[in-house]
Amino acid sequence: MPYLPCSTCGASMEVNIGDFNRHNMPNTKSDPKKVVGSALCRACGNGTGFEITDNVLNYVSGKSSYGSLTPPTAPAVSAFYSEAEMCFQTGAPNASATMCRAAIETALDQSGFTGSSLYEKIENAKGKKALDDMEVGLAHASRLITRESIHKAELITLSDIPSMLSATVHILNTLVRSQPK
């Protein structure tokens, strides 16, 4: 049985997969060798996202790996970002990536960067020097990854999400710092 550490309190949790895919979700196509999910910690009650392939734990979420938002972040932006974290913690990587994109777009909107598309808003922020070249690249990567997921059914894996959350935190914190005081 694999054990995983709780990403909140560090307690060790035994993960018992059993026949989850076959019995609990009979109408879905699933890989019997791969399980993605969230384990609830008995010690603190919080969830920790994980991925197991061939009975080997190959991914465990951990908030310290992607950072936290710097106040004052707009309430709508914080809400979208919190939802991205919750989706990640519950094993929903496509939803998490989509919420990262929503947080970035909302932050750009609330920072006054206009455009008819996310691409134009990112370029507007670049033109006004609110985002540097690296941050622009990260924002465009978020836009492109989620576009492929939403429109072309390209699945995002759970292990892709910490870097996306980290990039989102970096972009959002940069936009907060660029606001006039």
Image: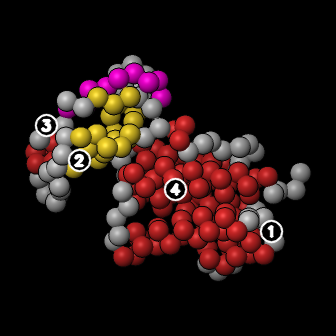
Q: Quadrant of residue 168?
A: bottom right
Type of amino acid under label 4: Met
Task: Name the mark on residue 129.
Answer: 1
Count neighbours of disc 1 (C-alpha within 10 A) and say few if under 14, some if 14 to 19, many if 20 or more.
few
The CA span between labels 4 and 3 is 31 Å
The CA span between labels 1 and 4 is 22 Å
Please tell me whether mark 2 or mark 4 is closer to you in this view.
2
Type of amino acid under label 3: Gly
Magenta-highlighted residues? 8-16
Query: Number of numbered discs present?
Result: 4
- Residue placed under numbered mark 2 in the picture: 53
Q: Are marks 2 and 4 in contact (CB under 8 Å)?
A: no
Q: Is residue 106 visible?
A: no
- Residue placed under numbered mark 4 in the picture: 164
Count neighbours of disc 2 (C-alpha within 10 A) and say few if under 14, some if 14 to 19, many if 20 or more.
some
Q: Which of pointers 1 and 3 lies earlier in the amino acid sequence?
A: 3
Q: Is residue 9 magenta?
A: yes
